[in-house]
Amino acid sequence: MKILLDHCVPRPFGRMLQPHEVHTAFRMGWSELSNGALLAAAAAGGFDAMITVDQGVRYQQNLKQVPLSVLILATKKNTTQRLRPHATHVLRLLPTLALRSVALIDADGTLQIISPASP
């Protein structure tokens, strides 16, 4: 699966998501893009999912129009250490996540599907 890490997700978190193909917004040259433009670029770039800690993204964007899934990691700080517990849950969820789904994942593994795939 091809995954994009949003600006606010530390690059080392991507290494925890092996064997998936993980890219950062910065490495893609998209560090200056706002959420809407970043989602559009990710969709055009063939990404299957974007991972973010920005819980506001679900309110700011019409995610049903973007042909990729968005995983929001609930955390108080976006450090690699704080995000480490999420990696196992993300790896478990990715194969089952429907296209255009939006999921909120807590560090304890609590999963909330905010917006399931729509036709």
Image: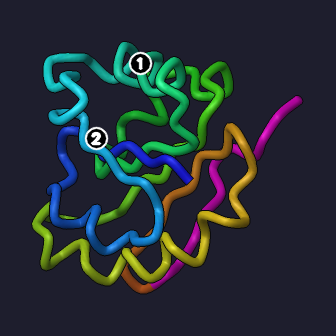
Q: Secondary structure at mark 1?
A: helix
Residue 59 location, x and y as percent?
Answer: 46, 30
Name the residue at 29% across, 51% down: 53
**Residue type indicated by callout 1:** Ala
The magenta segment is: 109-119
Badge number at residue 29: none
Which of 37/41 is in front? 41
Q: Would you identify the image quadrant in which residue 11 lies?
A: bottom left
User: For the C terminus, which image quadrant?
Assistant: top right
User: Which badge, 2 or 1, comes first in the chain's sequence?
Assistant: 2
Is disc 2 surrounded by few (<14), some (14 to 19) or many (20+) residues within 10 Å?
many
Residue 51 location, x and y as percent?
Answer: 39, 50
- Residue most extreme to the right: 119
Q: Is residue 30 above or below residue 49?
A: above
Q: Is residue 118 magenta?
A: yes
Q: Is residue 85 above or below residue 57?
A: below
Is disc 1 surrounded by few (<14), some (14 to 19) or many (20+) residues within 10 Å?
some
| Residue bearing mark 2 | 6
- From the viewer's perspective, tell me whether residue 91 is left or right of residue 55: right
- From the viewer's perspective, tell me whether residue 63 is left or right of residue 89: right
| Residue bearing mark 1 | 41
Name the residue at 28% across, 41% down: 6
Q: Secondary structure at mark 2?
A: loop
- From the viewer's perspective, tell me whether residue 20 is left or right of residue 37: right
Q: Would you identify the image quadrant in which residue 41 lies?
A: top left
Name the residue at 24% across, 66% down: 13
**Residue type indicated by callout 2:** Asp
Residue 112 location, x and y as percent?
Answer: 60, 64
- From the viewer's perspective, tell me whether residue 39 is left or right of residue 52: right
Residue 16 location, x and y as percent?
Answer: 31, 74
